[in-house]
């Protein structure tokens, strides 16, 4: 099994365990690094069970692929995945981190 297949398999299991998440996986050949975007940010930043799963995944990955890099990030970080190799949303995924403005929309008058 290569690194990409390992990651896809583990991300599938992640979504089954945490159906409120969405993951997007990409590989940057220039940096020789695997990147995983996890949504929503609130789960990425605050869900302790998810954090433990992520740490276990990283440790297993490093053990099997010691010369490869892997990184996790979320919306608002400086990394973006332009060509995803894998993308999956759990059945309960809903991006609850959408922020609405308190500004009122402009009044439109049609004559």
Image (cartoon, rainbow, N blue to C red):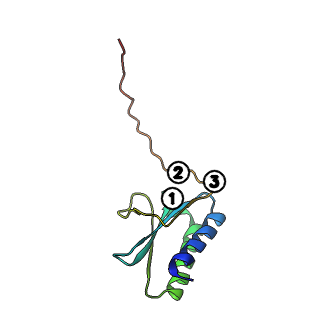
Q: Quadrant of the N terminus?
A: bottom right
Q: Which residue is mark 2?
A: 95
Sooner in the amino-acid sequence: mark 2 or mark 1 = 1
Q: Position of residue 6 (x, y in %)?
A: 56, 78
Determine whether 111 is above or below 80 in the image. above
Q: Position of residue 80 (x, y in %)?
A: 39, 62
Residue at the spot x=65%, y=66% of the render? Answer: 17
- Give neighbour class at mark 2: few <14, some 14-19, many 20+ (Cα, 10 Å): some
Q: Which residue is mark 3?
A: 92
Splitting the image into 4 quarters, where does residue 20 fall?
Answer: bottom right
Q: Position of residue 46 (x, y in %)?
A: 52, 62
Sooner in the amino-acid sequence: mark 3 or mark 1 = 1
Q: Secondary structure beneath disc 1?
A: strand
Q: Are marks 2 and 1 in contact (CB under 8 Å)?
A: yes
Determine whether 49 is above or below 66 in the image. above
Q: Which residue is mark 1?
A: 39
The answer to whether residue 31 is visible is: yes
Q: Quadrant of the C terminus?
A: top left
């Amino acid at each position: 099994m290569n690194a990409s297949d390992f990651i896809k398999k583990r991300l599938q299991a992640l979504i089954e365990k945490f159906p409120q998440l969405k993951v997007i996986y990409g590989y940057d050949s220039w940096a020789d690094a695997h990147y995983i975007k996890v949504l929503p940010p609130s789960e990425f930043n605050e869900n302790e069970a998810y954090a433990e799963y992520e740490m276990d995944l990283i440790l297993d990955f490093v053990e099997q692929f010691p010369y490869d890099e892997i990184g996790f990030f979320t919306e608002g970080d400086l990394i973006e995945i332009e060509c995803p190799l894998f993308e999956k949303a759990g059945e309960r995924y809903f991006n609850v981190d959408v922020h609405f403005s308190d500004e009122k929309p402009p009044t439109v008058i049609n004559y």
